Image: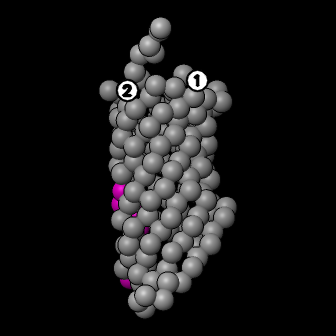
Amino acid sequence: MPNISGSFSAHVTAQSAFSADDQPNHQLQLAEIRATQKSPDPEWNNSRVTYCSVSDLVSGNGTQRGYYSNEHPNGDRDYGSFESRVTTAAGQTTIDGTFTIAGGTGKYQNIRGSGTYKGRQVSPTLIEITWTGAYEMAASRVA
């Protein structure tokens, strides 16, 4: 399985927050994030990532889950899901999670893989993420 790694600085392109009245400082957030990947692997370098997430936070701490899609420079895509732990301490929000590559289109049609990522919220609309993982391309079945 080839190893991959990379990073991106993502802009929040859409966000909504809802207060839940079941406990103090409980908030549900929906967000869409877009960025261009930087990676030493030319397959991932300059791919455009979009991810949509749901965060369930109490006083800035909780979980985040969602789905992502990477559009590679050749137009093919890989996509999958992610989940993370969100922690806010001393005014800094960090994210620590895992992702699963579930499939794709074109050359990535039979891709599978997984990895981990870490991130931090730089501002209310900017997030920095670094990630590492591994993938494999299953052979296509011919009928």
Tell me if residue 37 comes above or below residue 65 in the rendering.
above
Given the current orientation, which residue lies at the most extreme top position? 143
Residue 123, by quadrant, is bottom right
Task: Please determine whether, in this image, residue 39 is positioned above or below residue 111.
Answer: below
Q: Which residue is mark 2?
A: 136
- Residue 124: x, y in percent? 58, 73
Q: Tell me if residue 129 is in the magenta stretch.
A: no
Q: Amino acid at mark 1?
A: Gly
x then y, percent, for residue 74: 64, 27
Confirm or deny contact between disc 2 and disc 1 (CB under 8 A).
no
* In the foreground, 29 or 129: 29
Q: Provide the residue designation for mark 1.
A: 106
Q: In the orientation shown, which residue stands out farthest toward the left? A: 1
Looking at the rendered structure, the secondary structure element under dot 2 is strand
Q: Which mark is residue 143?
A: none
User: Mark 2 is on which residue type?
Assistant: Glu
Is residue 70 visible in the rendered structure shown here?
yes
What residue range appears in magenta? 90-97
Q: Quadrant of the N terminus?
A: top left
